[in-house]
Amino acid sequence: MSSLSEIAARLPTSKSDDEKTTRNALFKQFDPNGNGYLSLAEVDKGLRETYGLDALYNCKPAIMRAFQASKGLKKGKGGREDDYVSRVEFRMLLVYLKQYFELFQIFSSMDQGQDRRVDVDEFKAATPK
């Protein structure tokens, strides 16, 4: 299975024509009902099916934060569409996923107790001397 770093490197986030084509195919893969909007569940399922479960299982907070940051970037007509990620917002979702995966890895390496908190001792141990 892939690590978060490998997954992040494979996310098509640039504005090149090749990555735009890849991104459009990925959006279609994530959008099984074809309504043009992605729910958090569809994003989570799409990531797991495309990139492997093991590396993504414990990083749901990063996925959720990236989803929340990207949905509604393109303001809709005030309906439910602002609760979902549209095709226009999908590139930014992938950009946020890259950033949040990196932060999640840094945080996880500091969190020696695996309790999703960094206490003072863990913080001191992680800072350069």
Image: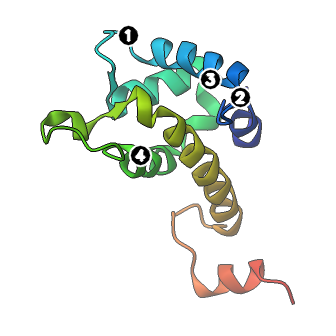
- Indicate the amino acid at tag 2: Ser
Contact (Cβ within 8 Å) of mark 1 with mark 2: no
- Whichever of callouts 2 and 4 sits on the residue coming sooner in the sequence is 2
Q: Is residue 6 left or right of residue 86?
A: right
Looking at the picture, does residue 96 appear above or below residue 112?
Answer: above
Give the image quarter of residue 58: top right
The image's colour scheme reads rainbow
- Whichever of callouts 1 and 4 sits on the residue coming sooner in the sequence is 1
- Indicate the amino acid at tag 3: Lys
- The spot of residue 14 in percent (x, y) is 68, 36
Can you tell which of label 1 and label 4 is closer to the viewer?
A: 4
Contact (Cβ within 8 Å) of mark 3 with mark 2: yes
> Callout 1: 10 Å neighbours few (<14), some, many (20+)?
few
Contact (Cβ within 8 Å) of mark 3 with mark 1: no
What residue is disc 1 on? 32
Q: Which residue is drawn at the image coordinates 57% and 81% (left, top)?
A: 119
- The spot of residue 93 in percent (x, y) is 49, 40
Q: 71 or 106, which lies in front?
A: 71
What residue is disc 3 on? 20
Q: 118 or 61, which lies in front?
A: 61
Q: Which residue is drawn at the image coordinates 36% and 47% (left, top)?
A: 73
Q: Distance of mark 1 from mark 4, alpha carbons?
A: 20 Å
What residue is disc 4 on? 70
- The spot of residue 103 in percent (x, y) is 63, 59
Q: Quadrant of the N terminus?
A: top right
What residue is disc 2 on? 16
- Indicate the amino acid at tag 4: Ser
Looking at the picture, does residue 30 appear above or below residue 65?
Answer: above
Q: Is residue 92 left or right of residue 120?
A: left
> Callout 4: 10 Å neighbours few (<14), some, many (20+)?
many
- Indicate the amino acid at tag 1: Pro
Can you tell which of label 3 and label 1 is closer to the viewer?
A: 3
